[in-house]
Image (tube, rainbow, N blue to C red):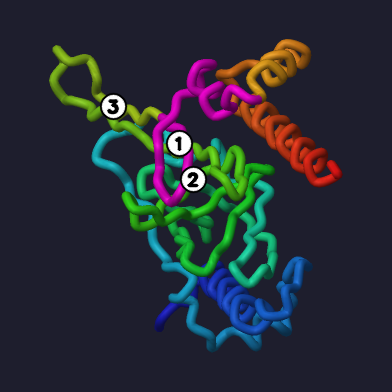
Amino acid sequence: MFKVNYYILFYVLVICFISICFNSYGQERNDNFAINSAKNLTSAASNNIQNHGTSGYFYNPKREIIGSEFLFENWNNKAFIVTKNKFKFKIANLNLNLKSGSFMSKINKDSVFTFNMENIDKIVVNNKVFKAYKTDEIKSEIFEVLFESQEYSILKKGYVQIQSGSPNPMVNRPKDIIKKKKKYYVLKDNKLNPIKLKKKEILKLVGSKNLKKIKQYVKTEKLSYTHEKDISMIIQYLYTLKKSILIEVAHKP
C-alpha cells in the first residue's frame, strides 16, 4: 500500500495556500502576514503550486565536499516575501543556492522547494534585500540590493567556485572544495556595470559636485570605501545632499 509522506503533504498544503495569497489577496495590497490556519490549508489543497516554484531533492555527491553552495550557514533564517502585488508573507527554512541562483525552502532532510521569482518583487532574509533583475545582458538573476534609487542601484552577486577533488595522492585534494565569491555592480539604464569597492570607484559615483562633503562625511563617521554597510551609508548621504539642493532651489524666488 502507498505510504503517505506527511511532511511533504503538509508543505505542499502550505505552498498551495501561498498560491491563493498570490492570486486572491494581491489586489488588496495587504501588508499583513499570511496566517496558515488549518482551515486555509485544507481549502487550498486542490490548488496548483507550479506557478510559484518546483519541488526537488538533495543528492549525495560522489566525493565529500568542504564548504556549502548556500549563502547562509543554516536554514533557520528570518525571512519574508513581497509579491509584485505587494502581498507580504513570512517563510521559514529559506536559503539562497549560489550555484543555481535560486531561493529554496527545505521541506525535510532530503527535499526542497525552489521559488520562481517571476511574481515576486523581493525576498528579505535577515534584513538583507534580494531581487531578481532582467537587463540587456541577463534574462533574470538574483542580486542583493545594497542601495536602490531611480537613478541607479548598487547590487551584489554571490556565486561559488568549485575546486574538484582528486583520488590522486600526489594532488593531496581528496575532497571537493566550494568557495563563496561575490561581485558588485551598478545597475543604470538597464545595464549592469561591474564596480569594485574601492575609494576611486565609489567617488566616481559621487561626482565632483558633492565630493568634498562626502569625503568629510566619511572622515567624520570613520567609514570605509571597502565595506558594504559603509558604502550604503555614503550613497544614502549623497542622496540626502541632492534632495537638500533640490529643496533649496525650489524655494528660491
Q: Is residue 91 visible?
A: yes
Magenta-colored stretch includes residue 174: no
Residue at point 48% right, 54% down? 132
Q: Quick one: 233 or 124, which is closer to the camera?
A: 233
Examine the image and state in which quarter residue 160 appears. Answer: top left
The mark closer to the camera, 3 or 1, is 1
Task: Give the side of residue 139 with respect to residue 220, left or right.
Answer: left
Q: Residue 181 in the image: state x and y as whole percent.
A: 41, 30
**Toward which corner of the image does residue 43 lie, by quadrant?**
bottom right
Which residues make up the magenta segment?
A: 181-209
Whether the magenta-drawn stretch holds residue 189 is answered as yes
Report which residue position mark 1 lands on. Answer: 185
If you read the primary sequence from the N terminus, does the residue marked by circle 1 or circle 2 appear first? 2
- Give the mark nearer the N terminus: 3 vs 2: 2
Q: Which kind of residue does numbered mark 2 sit on? A: Phe
Q: How far apart are the alpha carbons under marks 3 and 2?
A: 29 Å
Find disc 2 in the rendering and name its residue.
143
Mark-to-mark CA distance, 3 and 1: 32 Å
Q: Quadrant location of the N terminus?
A: bottom left
- Dot label at residue 175: 3
Q: Is residue 40 above or below residue 100?
A: below
| Towards the viewer: 205 or 48 | 205
Residue 76 seen from this side: no
Q: Are marks 1 and 2 in contact (CB under 8 Å)?
A: yes
Quadrant location of the C terminus?
Answer: top right
